[in-house]
Image: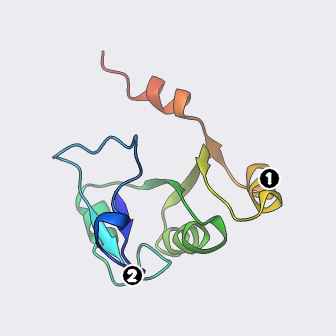
Amino acid sequence: MIRDIEEGDGPDYQYISGLEVDKSDIEITKVFNNSFWQTNLDQILKEKRIDTVIISGNALEHCVTATYFGAKERGYRVLFLQRGIVAEFNENLQRLYFEKPLVSYAALASMFKSK
C-alpha cells in the first residue's frame, strides 16, 4: 500500500475509510507523485519477483499517471483497477478506461480465490 504524505502525515492523512489494511501489508510512504520515485517500491517488488502492478488510487491526473509511467519505465506490466481510480475530471477517467488495460475487482478475486 502506498500512502502519500506530501501534504502531511497526521490523523487527517490516514487511510480511506473502508480500506482493509492487514498487519502484514507493506506500507510505503511517498512525497512525490510517482510512487517509485525515492521510495523502495521497486526494490520490494523485485525481491518478491512481482512483474505486474495493478494501480488504484486518487488523483489520476497526478499520482496515478506518474506511478503508471514510473512502473512502465521500470519494465512492469501495468493494469488499472476498474472503478478503483479517482479523477479530478471525469473525461480523463473515461479516456483512461478506453485507452489503458483494466482489470476488475471480480476478476482479481476470482484469480486469487483460496482453493
- Pinpoint residue 11: horizontal percent, then vertical percent: 29, 64
- Pinpoint residue 13: horizontal percent, then vertical percent: 36, 66
In this picture, residue 57 sits left or right of residue 87: left
Name the residue carrying label 1.
94
> What element does badge 2 sit on?
loop
In this picture, residue 47 sits left or right of residue 59: left
Point out the image quarter for the N terminus.
bottom left
**Viewer-proximal residue among 49 and 22:** 22
Name the residue carrying label 2.
31
In the rendered image, the vertical position of residue 112 relative to residue 11, given as above or below: above
Q: Mark 1 is on which residue type?
A: Gln
Question: Residue lying furthest top in this view?
Answer: 115
- Pinpoint residue 4: horizontal percent, then vertical percent: 40, 71
Q: Mark 2 is on which residue type?
A: Val
Residue occupying the point 27% across, 74% down? 40
Point out the image quarter for the C terminus.
top left
